[in-house]
Amino acid sequence: MKKFSCILLLLLPTCFRAQELILQGRVVDAETGDLLPYATISVGKGRGTLTNTEGYFRLKASSGDEVTFSFVGFEKHSMEAQDIPSIVKLKPFKRVLPEVMIKPRGESDVIRYVIRNLKRDFSRHRKERQAYFLRSLMNNGSDSYLIECFTAWSSSVNLRDEEVFSGIYGMNVEGEKSKVKLTYTNIDRMAEVSPSAFMSNYWSKAIKPLNSISETMKYYNVGIDVLFNEAGENLYCIKFHWNNRMTEKGKWRRYITGTAFVDRSTLHLLRFEGEVNNAYQWVDDKRLPTSIKFQMSYDYSKGYASVGSLAVQGGNDEMSYRMLLFGIPADSLLMTSGGFVGKNIIDELKYAGYDESLWEEYNIVKRTREEEAVAFTQ
């Protein structure tokens, strides 16, 4: 097994190109001071990173580069790289008061159009692929297991058909003594979660709020708010609550609840914060109730709803995990035939190997303190 301690020095920059800056800091809500995990940080077309689960970022940029910080539901903030402070504050959108709200469409019409747009994008672009950086951390209370790798997925509307191209993995114990048994807990299947999942065997039987209008109106109570900012941008904030009258009919099925953020003019789904209810997870041959929460954003730069980033976390008394995927402009990976597909991501990584140049080329999401603790284990 590869150890992070054996290869970590390869990941640290040994020199800097002229004018290159290493920017570090955190992104927060300007009103509450709360950290904003998974905020997007962009430097030019297709370049950038995310804040980690603790709201911190690390970014390579050149002096004079314009860097944009964004998070759906908050106002974008752009500045030159050399002017970026250690704390970046984003202003949240305001909620339109009910007495002045103008609703040109009914709730069911809004949802119907959102679903129609997602189905259209999937139908037309189901074969489109996107490269991602993936990081996952698993913990059973005593041992932790960290994975970092470059992957590719079919990306329209939801992720599926994974390939692994390069990766590293390790744990905070020596040798093969960890009790984290990935044979029975395959983290990468969680990457297929979505409020509108197509062609995913793992999620096909789950009840989802944006898969069909009939399913939505049957299983959910829906509430819609309108959000706006000073620039005149508008969002629908659509909350999907479980209809308790349907509990008996859906008690054997997983179901997703949560909040969708939708562009009011295009009715494009921009972000979804969700939770999987009635979920179970296999741990060491035992089927245990588990919590699953996720947050995903969508990228429309290629003209369709492609998954831009996805963060999933969950677990139970015996196993907890979190996973992050972030889309990167690595078209060269998609054109190669070196990807490995299998039933277990660790088996895939054994065959894929490790390509140091990928870690040098892209802005990898900053590790959290817990992730660093595993990576630095001797």
Image: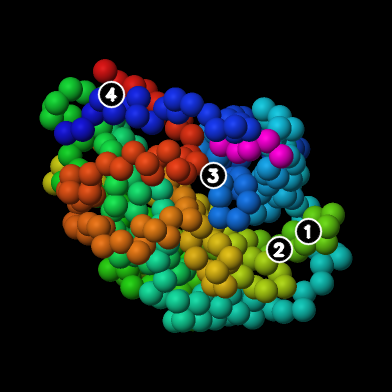
Q: Earlier in the sequence, mark 4 or mark 3?
A: 4
Magenta-span inclusion, residue 62: yes
Q: CA distance from mark 2 to mark 1?
A: 6 Å
Quick one: SS at disc 1? strand
* Residues under numbered marks 2 and 1 in contact, where contact means CB atoms less than 8 Å apart: yes
Q: Nearer the viewer, mark 3 or mark 2?
A: 3
Q: Residue at x 42, y 71 (%)?
A: 128
Q: Earlier in the sequence, mark 2 or mark 4?
A: 4
Per the image, the residue denoted by label 2 is: 235
Magenta-span inclusion, residue 171: no
Q: Residue at x 77, y 62 (%)?
A: 233
Q: Which residue type carries mark 3?
A: Thr
Q: Position of residue 258 (x, y in %)?
A: 53, 58
Segment tinted magenta in the rendering: 60-64
Rendered image quadrant of residue 45: bottom right
Q: Position of residue 290 (x, y in %)?
A: 33, 47
Report the disc number at residue 228.
Answer: 1
Q: Nearer the viewer, mark 1 or mark 4?
A: 4
The residue most toward the top is: 378
Q: CA distance from mark 3 to mark 1?
A: 26 Å
Q: Residues within 10 Å of mark 2 (few under 14, many from 20)?
A: many
Q: Is residue 5 visible?
A: yes
